[in-house]
Image (cartoon, grey):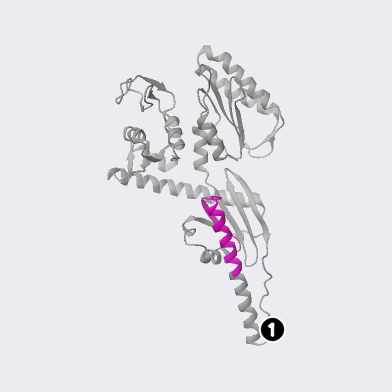
Amino acid sequence: MISARDLDFLFSWRAPECQSILSLYVDRKAAVGSWSPAELQTAVKGVVKDLEPRIDDADRPLLAVATEKVLALLENGPRAGRSLVVFADVGGDGFWERTLMIPVPSQARWGPTPSLRPLLEVLEEYERYGVVLTDRTRARLFTIFLGEIEEERDAFNPEPVRHAASTGTDQARTDPQRRSEAHSHHHFKRVAAMLDAMERQRRFDRLILGGPPDAPHQLRRVLPKRLVPRIGGTINLPLEAGAPEVLRETLAIERDLQRTRQSEAIAELETASAKDRKAVAGLEPTLEALREGRVLKLLYSDGLSLRGRQCESCGTLFDDSVTSCRYCGGKTHPIEDLIETMAETIAESGGRLEPVHEAAAERLGELGGIGAFLRF
């Protein structure tokens, strides 16, 4: 998993003067099995080969050194997962590696800081989900993040539940039935309390309810009111379902929710920016809001690539046409990926970013391909 401490380290990592950091994202295009060291080396060499023509001739020997360092460190056993993320510097001990169960487009960058845009995008795109499978007596709790599923607690039966007898007088049947219903209500309340505690520990952003047909409805009735808006959907699965099945059903709901959420966000952005209500659309207004520290959430079309420039004195970002800073008069130097620099600045200050896809991306394209919701 990727922790807040990991991100703090990556945000602060700077290569020494006249040196660079190699950033590698390698998509295996398969989510099962393990990569052997030989497969890893072949994949890494292929991604680096695509990078070589894009860097200065003087940097190529240093790139070769960084690549050899990565290849040597990856020789230590196979790795499981769909994608590999690696950052390595030329000298010293700087090395960071993670495998992910989700796809990240293969690419390599060479620069004074780690290239974090692809990593930040998947962290935003794949929310942390809580999943509960429950019936009237048992429950199983899971968390899902970045394509990985972890069971929080095995199936449990907090109290035995006696079901109503099928024979006898009406009174004899009624009392056991009431006790059974009371036990079930107590069980759902206990599950709701556990979910409440998980959410307060920031164990999930969304919640999916599952189990036999009536159980999610019964659980929803006793959930704390603040959790109800976090419900993303329901799945009809037995308590005995395996983790891979739970993950598959949940990811299908997540994809549908993402498309809906992004369409709603762009519609809101369009209306709010037109009325100047804590939102802007288009590159220039977004850059200005970023300079003022007002960006709460950046939205941009998936795959959008923009070159830009940055002031060498005050750090202000501009589009590619600005050669001197409008604010301090300093010189500007070129930025290969303006969106990446914007995204890292926003994420480091506690803001969020979201690349939008499909119909939402087309609609955002009509607004300039980029926009932001603002803090003030």
Do we see residue 303 in this rendering?
Answer: no
Point out residue 188 in the picture as x, y percentages from the top left corner.
58, 66
In the depicted structure, whether residue 252 falls above or below residue 113: below
Identify the residue at image location x=56%, y=14%: 60
Indicate yes or no whether the magenta region holds residue 205.
yes
Point out residue 239 in the picture as x, y percentages from the top left corner.
65, 60
Tell me the crowding category of disc 1: few under 14, some 14 to 19, or many 20 or more residues within 10 angstroms, Cα based.
few
Front residue of 83 and 124:
124
Front residue of 138 and 9:
9
Task: Indicate the amino acid at tag 1.
Answer: Thr
In the depicted structure, whether residue 340 falls above or below residue 186: above
Indicate yes or no whether the magenta region holds residue 2.
no
The residue singled out by tag 1 in the image is 167
Identify the residue at image location x=66%, y=85%: 172
**Looking at the image, which residue sits at the far right?**
77
Identify the residue at image location x=45%, y=31%: 340
**What span is in magenta?**
186-213
Point out residue 211 in the picture as x, y percentages from the top left corner.
60, 61
Residue 90 image-quadrant placement: top right
Identify the residue at image location x=56%, y=36%: 6
Q: Count all numbered tags in the image, as a single digit.
A: 1
Do we see residue 51 in this rendering?
Answer: yes
Residue 33 image-quadrant placement: top right
Name the quarter where the N terminus is drawn.
top right
Point out residue 233 in the picture as x, y percentages from the top left corner.
52, 56
Name the quarter where the C terminus is drawn.
top left
